[in-house]
Amino acid sequence: DDTPLRVVPVDIDREQLDRALSQHKPAAIYVTPMRAVSVKDIAESAAGAQATTMTGVPRYIESGMAVSVRLLDARPKLMLNVSAATAQGAQFSSDLLRLAQVRK
């Protein structure tokens, strides 16, 4: 597939997330570690925009992020929040679900 990848940083301290999602229409959103920002609100905005959320902060899975990675015995382990992913328009294969730590 030759589809180009485009990264658009959004500073949610200075720009409204819903407006940025409407303007850029992303397929996915990567959420970095944050303070004083509601991860749940980001997840809800992502669901409204049908954009799948991903993060490197495993605890964000509990707040509505769809995909994360954590270390388990010094190896990366994929974490999936299936209900969040479904709300955000993502579908995962049964093969991927078998490999991941799944939260429903």
Image (cartoon, rainbow, N blue to C red):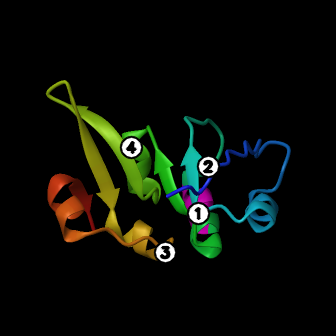
Measured in 3D between alpha carbons, the distance from the residue under mark 2 to the one under mark 1, in whole angstroms, is 10 Å
Which secondary structure type mostly characterizes the magenta part of the structure? Answer: helix
Which residue is under mark 1? Answer: 27
Find the residue positioned furthest to the front. 2
* Residue 16 falls in image quadrant: bottom right
The answer to whether the residues at label 1 and label 3 have Cβ atoms under 8 Å apart is no
Which residue is under mark 3? Answer: 89
Which residue is under mark 2? Answer: 5
Q: Earlier in the sequence, mark 2 or mark 1?
A: 2
Q: Earlier in the sequence, mark 4 or mark 3?
A: 4
- Tell whether 21 sits left or right of 41: right
Amino acid type of the residue tagged 4 in the rendering: Arg
Amino acid type of the residue tagged 1 in the rendering: Ala
Which residue is under mark 4? Answer: 59
Q: Which residues are magenta?
A: 40-44
- Who is closer to the viewer here, 57 or 26? 26
- Tell whether 86 sits left or right of 10: left
* Residue 34 falls in image quadrant: top right
Measured in 3D between alpha carbons, the distance from the residue under mark 1 to the one under mark 4, in whole angstroms, is 22 Å
Query: Which tag is nearer the camera, tag 1 or tag 3?
Result: 1
Q: Position of residue 48 (x, y in %)?
A: 63, 74
Query: Which tag is nearer the camera, tag 3 or tag 2?
Result: 2
Find the residue positioned furthest to the top. 74
